[in-house]
Amino acid sequence: MKKRMIALLLGLSLVFSLAACAAGSAAPDAPAAPDAPAASVPPDVPAAPSASGEAEQAPAAAPEKSEPVLVAKPEYPVMIRYQDDAEGWMNQRFAFYQWQEEHPIELDEFYAATIPALLSGAGEDNRVCSPASLYLALAMAAEISGEESRAQLLALLGADDLEALEESADTLWTADYRDDGTQTSVLAGSLWMRDDDIPCLKGTVKTLRDVFRASSYRGDMSDPRYGEMLRDWLNAQTGGQLADAAESITLDPDTMLELLSTVYFRAKWIDPFDAANTAPAVFHAPGGDVECDFLNEEFSEFWVYQGAHFTAVQRSFDGSGSMWFLLPEEGMAPEALLGDAEALAFLCSGGSEEAEWYYGRLSLPKLDVSSDLELSDMLKALGVTDVFDPARADLSALYEDVTGVALTEVRHAARLTMDEEGVTAAAFTGMGYGAGGPQYEMDFILDRPFLFKLAYSQNDPLFVGIVNQP
């Protein structure tokens, strides 16, 4: 049969390219990010009939340029919003903390393998990425792969089998999801399939819906409207933060399927910076000194972790999570810290357990850092090769009768902005098969290259990055 290529995109959103399958049941729309367009399907897209868990043959002769069809849509948790019920919100928060104690995130081996690979090679540029997004993207790739192709993905993801992987992915998703009126951390997924006679296993589509909260669509890959729908969905789920990267995601007649996984995060500082204190100052970039705006607080209280070769300072969000800023010792580049076992362990899951409470002056550069990376070579170097080989790639968990389909592109796009009010971050991954008072004093002036970690649930790295020039 004719070879069909699949494209995969990575970032705060995840994208795969595969072949179309028949319908599944619809579920409520995912919540939209603040100030972002709603992530629902356009109203003129009809929902397909309810799906069983078995393979189904699509109609043999679909009308030319047929309307896209909604196959399945996940149901997101409904959270009590603080503005509506403060007591109920507090009880919900306490229940979540108890759930966290019983469901630890254990992905340090995956983070330790991928964070240095993601952040290395930045040179004098900035680099930002989402290890959590990449994990969910690769987990979805494992879900649709046959046993042989899946083995390499499971090894990188640190899972013994598919059941263990699904449990781990569900724990990560649940831990990092929040939409309660105080913070937004929304993870979403979607499949965009061909509207042709290629049968698919709808049980896999159901698993992607239930475990990864992935919607599924079916349409004509040559119809420009279908590609525009995909990009609209992607921009909605990332709050418009990655519009340029999203514009390059296109569908064509040889595309089997696009699989997207997205993350959108937005939170305010627990103590916002006073805009009146924001002032220009010098940042000592690798290519020479540059002037940029700094967020300043003359008397601040913060947690500090003193490593052998770095100092890390925490700035907390209102609710949960924080930003950690890792400043290397004088004369050491941030990228060199990626080879330091202590610094890498801190990026993977380190946090306030070993930190001490300080007070002093805090001065941080305002940030707007972004990256758009191609990760195929990185994944091959980490042992994932079969999915890129048309002779070995196996998508039998999704399609019963498709061969010669291989992963051709893996892109990861991410962006993080930081100002007086707080932090906004987004990413997408696309794959193309197509406290007491302070005890110590310190002035922390972040005026030279540094690493950062946006730590959310259980100090896992929702985002990490290198800043060489604000």
Image (spheres, rainbow, N blue to C red):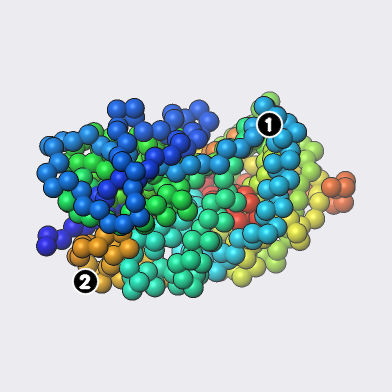
Q: Nearer the viewer, residue 334 or 178?
A: 178
Question: Residue flagged by tag 1: what amino acid is it?
Answer: Tyr
Q: Residue at coordinates 44% horizontally, 29% vertically from top-left?
A: 37
Q: Quadrant of the N terminus?
A: bottom left
Q: Residue at coordinates 53% horizontally, 31% vertically from top-left?
A: 34
Mark 2 or 1: the one toward you: 1
Q: CA distance from mark 2 to mark 1?
A: 53 Å
Please say if 337 is above or below 248: below
Helix, strand or loop at label 1? It is: loop
Please say if 227 is above or below 43: below
Helix, strand or loop at label 2? It is: loop
Q: Residue at coordinates 70% horizontally, 29% vertically from top-left?
A: 85
* Disc 1: which residue: 82
CA neighbours of label 2 inside 10 A, class few (<14), some (14 to 19), many (20+): few
Disc sitting over residue 192 in the figure? none
Q: Is residue 440 visible?
A: yes
* Disc 2: which residue: 391
In the displayed structure, does residue 376 sit left or right of residue 139?
A: left
Q: Of callouts 2 and 1, which one flags the residue occurring earlier in the amino acid sequence? A: 1
In the displayed structure, does residue 166 sit left or right of residue 430?
A: right
Q: Nearer the viewer, residue 187 or 119?
A: 187
Q: Is residue 242 visible?
A: no
Question: Residue flagged by tag 2: what amino acid is it?
Answer: Ala
